[in-house]
């Protein structure tokens, strides 16, 4: 971007960065809950590393938001209420069984796969730079969870049944990944991010055939495109746990 972006554009970038940071943070928290509980030792280590990666990516997006808005990243993480978070509901849902966690991770990783592929070519350098930094790790996440989807879907009757149930439970939440907001439309109009409908089409072209090849039936139910300000009660419970120590002494220096 050769011209200096105007205030409206910067505010939109900050809001989009905040939503991506919140997605990564809350998913990292959920993933970390599997540490010590994954089905095999190798996966316990691998998935703990994925949780750490997601947290690191959240830090990068929070820093971008902070650089634009001047807000403190620690305040954004530890002192906002659930209503102020901008993550999608999918990432805040309780983990359930391993099939549920892997299905959620696959659906979200596929979203990041197509989203980052577009953002690395963004004309706003800070967005493109962060996308470039995290894309390699996210490609690993995508391949890892893709393998698990095949393993579960084409495994035993029980693993297929559990994964199908997980897919049906998660599918209604997919629409929120691609819901258009005022801020996203500002960036679409400025040709900085792709149109949300186009992004959804790219995602579907990857996900639907892969799910079918994994022995799974794609639900016919149309995903709900709700606002990112809408949350379940599970986010409040998660934040109560995550923010507890920081709120005991808000002035503490770590």
Image (cartoon, helix red, strand yellow):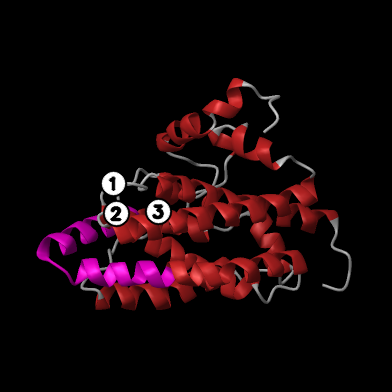
Residue 47 image position (x, y, % from top left): 39, 57
The answer to whether the residue labelled 3 contacts the one labelled 1, judged by CB atoms less than 8 Å apart, is: no
Magenta stretch: give its range: 142-170
| Residue 175 higher or lower than 200, as above or below | above
Q: Earlier in the sequence, mark 2 or mark 3?
A: 2
Determine whether label 2 and label 3 are within 8 Å by CB: no
Residue 13, position as x, y percentages in the image: 72, 57
Q: Which mark is residue 29?
A: none
Whether 31 is drawn above or below 216: the answer is above
Query: Quadrant of the rendered structure where residue 234 is?
Result: top left
Percent x, y for residue 49? 46, 57
Residue at 52% across / 72% down in the picture? 114
| Proximity of marks 1 and 2: CB atoms separated by less than 8 Å | yes
Quadrant into which the N terminus falls:
bottom right
- Measured in 3D between alpha carbons, the distance from the residue under mark 3 to the one under mark 1, in whole angstroms, is 15 Å
Please report the residue visible at 32 percent of the width from the left and 72 percent of the height from the top. 147
Q: Is 2 displayed left or right of 25 in the figure? A: right
Question: For residue 173, which numbered disc appears in the image?
Answer: 3
Is 51 one of the magenta-colored residues?
Answer: no
Q: Is residue 250 left or right of residue 45?
A: right
Nearer the viewer's eye, disc 2 or disc 3? 2
How many C-alpha atoms fall within 10 Å of the one at disc 3: few (<14), some, or many (≥20)?
some
Nearer to the camera, 71 or 195: 71
Q: Main secondary structure of the magenta part?
A: helix
CA neighbours of label 1 inside 10 A, class few (<14), some (14 to 19), many (20+): few
Q: In screen coordinates, is 118 left or right of 68?
A: left
Disc assigned to residue 96 = 1
Could you say which quadrant of the image residue 78 lies in? top right
- Which residue is the site of mark 2? 100
Q: Residue furthest top?
A: 248
Q: Residue shown at 38%/64% (left/top)?
A: 106
Near-viewer residue (203 or 108): 108
């Amino acid at each position: 971007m050769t011209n200096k972006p105007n205030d409206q554009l910067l505010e939109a970038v900050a809001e989009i960065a905040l939503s991506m940071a919140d997605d990564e943070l809350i998913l990292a928290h959920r993933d970390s809950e599997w540490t010590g509980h994954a089905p095999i030792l190798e996966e316990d280590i691998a998935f703990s590393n994925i949780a750490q990666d997601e947290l690191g990516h959240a830090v990068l997006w929070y820093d971008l938001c902070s650089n634009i808005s001047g807000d403190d990243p620690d305040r954004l993480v530890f002192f906002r209420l659930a209503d102020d978070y901008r993550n999608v509901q999918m990432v805040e849902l309780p983990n359930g069984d391993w099939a549920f966690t892997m299905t959620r991770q696959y659906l979200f990783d596929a979203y990041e796969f197509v989203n980052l592929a577009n953002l690395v070519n963004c004309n706003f350098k800070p967005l493109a730079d962060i996308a470039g930094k995290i894309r390699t790790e996210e490609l690993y996440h995508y391949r890892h969870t893709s393998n698990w989807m095949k393993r579960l879907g084409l495994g035993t009757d029980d693993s297929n049944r559990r994964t199908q149930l997980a897919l049906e439970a998660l599918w209604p939440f997919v629409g929120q990944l691609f819901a258009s907001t005022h801020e996203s439309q500002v960036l679409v109009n400025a040709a900085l991010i792709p149109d949300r409908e186009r992004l959804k089409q790219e995602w579907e072209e990857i996900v639907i055939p892969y799910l079918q090849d994994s022995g799974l039936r794609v639900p016919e139910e149309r995903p709900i495109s709700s606002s990112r300000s809408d949350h379940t009660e599970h986010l409040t419970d998660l934040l109560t746990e995550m923010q507890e120590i920081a709120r005991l002494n808000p002035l503490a220096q770590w």
